[in-house]
Image (spheres, rainbow, N blue to C red):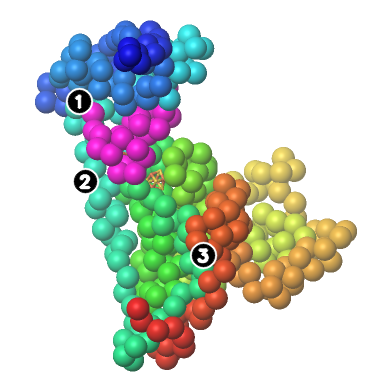
Amino acid sequence: MEAATKPAEKTMQVRVKIWRYDSQTGDRALKEYELEAPEWVTLLDVLDLIKDQQDGTLAYRKSCRMMICGSCGMRMDGAAVLACKTRMYDIVQAGHVPVISAMGNLPIVKDLVVDMDPFWDKFKAMKPYLQPGYEEPTEGKEYLVSQERMNVIHKEALCINCGACVSECNAMESDPAFLGPQALAKGMRFVGDARDANTVERLEDYSGEHGIWECTRCYFCNERCPKGVDPRDAIAKLGAEAMKQGVDTDMGAKHARWFVKSAETTGWLRETELVPKTQGVISAISQMKFAMGLAVKGKVPPPIPPHVADRVDESRALRKLVKEQGRDGYAGIVQGERALARLEHEASGAHGGMGSLESADVTPGEEPTAGKAD
Ligand code: SF4
Ligand code: SF4
Ligand code: FES
């Protein structure tokens, strides 16, 4: 009997351009590579083939090859990707020659390898570990955290520290000291953890200069995160929770608070009052000449009498409803659609019926209420 022959693997011609860079010599060049590769290859496979067959000096990072370790972050055509998640087939079929370069907002060491030290410094600054304040449960008992409570940090816990969000962050581009999307998402992962007792201290730390309120809300981090963490949503949750907990002395927090007050009282954003309410009277006086110039051109409505919207009752009713529902703080931030779809999937029992877990919240300092230790 003849041995079965394996069908020939279908291949394609792949072309990529790679920005080569050597931080020691300062040499920089855009080099094009062409190779034959199986149709199933990812960008990471292509880099491996180039390194094996054409140029062993090409530098890039990798480890798991399956979107877990976060090592292979880089840019394709100016947007951050995980190389091991990026299939090449459609790109080749479209006749496109992508340009591959190192991630942004981090110093380049060589070719596609960036120095991750600034990234890890910010990560460590978030104190990314639990600081529980509760007593150890009595023997044979344990604290249980409800699935509903864990859902609060479901997205943030998906982060693999790849740096794709940091690469794309506009605020970090203008201020490299900004804590940035990855670190702040990590901060929310602990602020929202029912077992952590340092919520207010954390929010105070994260609300300072270069913190929560420095984000420009460009949403590029949500757009590029390969794991659906949606870091901008995490930052919004931190901001809302900071205000709920009274951590609101930063100008950004005052700005947000005035938005709410203004909409609640008149149904409009009263911009004329925004500067004094946010930056203080002295700062407002220093900008008076500019404000008068705007007023002369009809760009600033007179503050008195305040302009009240015809249907202001609707915005007041909406605010009342939000308060009645207890959706202050992070509970008021609607999660991204991708994350919600995932949560619904899990609640349906696809992962062992996690969604049906009924248990008490952990409240530091309170007695354990349920459960036997295994
Ligand atoms: S939304 Fe904020 S954190 Fe995210 S990329 Fe934009 S500026 Fe950076
Ligand atoms: S938030 Fe997303 S993009 Fe940013 S480091 Fe984590 S996994 Fe990567
Ligand atoms: S190699 Fe691990 S995430 Fe790509």
Can you see residue 320?
Answer: yes
The front one of 97 and 260 is: 97
Q: Secondary structure at mark 3?
A: helix
Q: Is mark 3 within 8 Å of ligand 2?
A: no
Query: Is the residue 285 above or below the residue 100 in the image?
Result: below
The question of residue 118 being in magenta is answered with no
Residue 172: % across, % down = 38, 43
Q: Which mark is residue 59?
A: 1
The question of residue 63 being in magenta is answered with yes
Q: Say whether disc 3 or disc 2 marks the residue closer to the N-terminus.
A: 2
Residue at which label 3 appears: 354
Q: Which residues make up the magenta segment? A: 60-86
Circle 2 residues within 10 Å: few <14, some 14–19, many ≥20: few
Q: Are marks 3 and 2 in contact (CB under 8 Å)?
A: no
Image quadrant assignment for residue 298: top right
Comparing labels 3 and 2, the label whose residue is closer to the camera: 3
- Could you tell me the amino acid type at mark 3? Met
Residue 59: % across, % down = 20, 25
The front one of 216 and 356 is: 356
Q: Are marks 3 and 1 in contact (CB under 8 Å)?
A: no
Q: Residue at x 46, y 88 (%)?
A: 369
The CA span between labels 2 and 1 is 18 Å
Q: Residue at x 40, y 21 (%)?
A: 40
- Could you tell me the amino acid type at mark 2? Asp
Q: Quadrant of the N terminus?
A: top left
Residue at which label 2 appears: 117
Query: Is the residue 330 above or below the residue 371 in the image?
Result: above
Q: Secondary structure at mark 2?
A: helix
Farthest residue, direction right: 310
The CA span between labels 3 and 2 is 37 Å
Residue 307 lies left or right of residue 172; in this view the side is right
